[in-house]
Amino acid sequence: MKVYLDNNATTPVDPLVLEAMLPYFVDKFGNAASRNHSFGWEAEQAVDAARAQIADLIGADPKEIIWTSGATEGNNIAVKGVAEMYADKGRHIITQVTEHKAVIDPCNYVGKHGYRVTFLPVDRTGLIDLQQLADAITDDTILVSIMHGNNEIGTLQPIAQIGRLCKERGVFFHTDCCQTFGKVPLNVEEMGIDLLTASGHKIHGPKGIGAMYIRRKRPRVRCAPLIHGGGHERGMRSGTLNVPCIVGMGRAAEICGRQMDTEPARIAALRDRLKNGILSQLDEVFLNGHPTGRTPTNLNLSFSYVEGESLMMAFDDIAVSSGSACTSASLEPSYVLKALGVGEELAHSSIRFSLGRFNTEEEIDYTIERVVAAVKRLREMSPLYELAQEGIDLSTVKWGEH
Ligand SMILES: *Cc1c(COP(=O)(O)O)cnc(C)c1O
């Protein structure tokens, strides 16, 4: 058996999505910007239908949806596009330490070009403090960018409250919703969202396509383009539209919408089955992220006395992620876990299990069996675990440099 539990990284394309895309490669290949023949109109109609499918899922007007190459580009447009467009209004941006790199890096970029960026800290569960956010907003603040569901730890930020606060203070609110778009009900009006980014391949759509919501009224938001040439997408993102992938992402969003009442609950139940199955058979396993306020797909656990990398190798038929990111030469613990205050040892022993539409109960039970056996076996070989079992307090042991 091979089990895929890395759905926060990417998801398989749903066969229904592929089926919707296929005609747009060969038969209906028109350029959506060709206004003078039926090939173009056909493509444009398909793009407009997909725009409506995205808009429907978040309570937006289809005119407010912009196509991008993915959420990385969307986040760049939000941060750099707003920074450039509103430079005369202010030069301060607020975000948080646990954002995806696709928000952190553009923020650092504008930070090097005359803007001030505040990175809000998070608590042990991954939540920002709303009072700290309110205190950070100044007359110079133009944008608050806080993600909805965290990709590593699953924590859900209270975006409706953040949106309300931003409205009161007259600041634009952007939210990276890659991990919640199609998985958690979203409404840009009720949540006071001005800019939102989503990605096709996180919702069983194709890779290399993303959608962005950019508010058109109350207030109107404009973003300076990153890519110039032709003025497509209301001038904010030029380039010939990727019609097959757009059709695919639209269809993927539509399927998520139709299943919203049942599917997130089914996935959350599988996720809880996995958690309970592991926790009931192993001691010294810790949940990272918020205990209840988390995305339905995400389970992040730290297994004391076991290295995440070794653990992943021990069950190589199950695809997961570890809490250590292999950056260039060194194996650094995840900056997200670090920000929560998870110690280095526990960060290195963390595993992210992330579930999706095609996971079954059978797969979860198999995973529980494999994980429990692997952790027990690795712990048996761990001198640290042996010491701890003998009642020696490891925090009092002096370790050499490492
Ligand atoms: C996957 C992901 C991204 C990047 O999306 P791409 O479409 O792959 O560029 C950004 N933010 C979050 C939270 C993600 O999970």
Image (cartoon, rainbow, N blue to C red):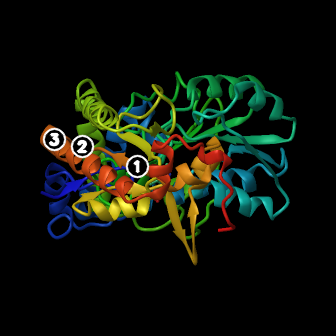
**Residue identifier under label 2:** 368
For the residue with label 2, is its CB less than 8 Å from the closest atom of ligand 1?
no
Residue name at image x 20 percent, y 58 percent:
21
- Distance from label 2 to label 1 (Cα)? 14 Å
Split into 4 quadrants, where in the image is the N terminus?
A: bottom left
Under mark 2, the amino acid is Ile
First in sequence, mark 3 or 2: give its number: 3
- How many numbered marks, from 0 up? 3
For the residue with label 1, is its CB less than 8 Å from the closest atom of ligand 1?
no
Above or below, comparing residue 281 to residue 202 in the picture: above
Under mark 1, the amino acid is Arg
Residue name at image x 81 percent, y 40 percent:
141
Name which quarter of the figure residue 398 lies in.
Answer: bottom right
Mark sitting on residue 301: none
Q: Residue furthest bottom?
A: 329
- The secondary structure type at the circle numbered 2 is helix
- Distance from label 3 to label 2 (Cα)? 13 Å
Residue name at image x 23 percent, y 30 percent:
266
Name which quarter of the figure residue 292 lies in.
Answer: top left
Q: Position of residue 337 (x, y in %)?
A: 57, 48
Q: Position of residue 330 (x, y in %)?
A: 58, 73
**Residue identifier under label 1:** 352
**Residue identifier under label 3:** 360
Name which quarter of the figure residue 358 lies in.
Answer: top left
Q: Nearer the viewer, mark 3 or mark 2?
A: 2
Split into 4 quadrants, where in the image is the C terminus?
A: bottom right
Above or below, comparing residue 349 to residue 26 in the picture: above
Report the side of 200 relative to 326 (left or right). left
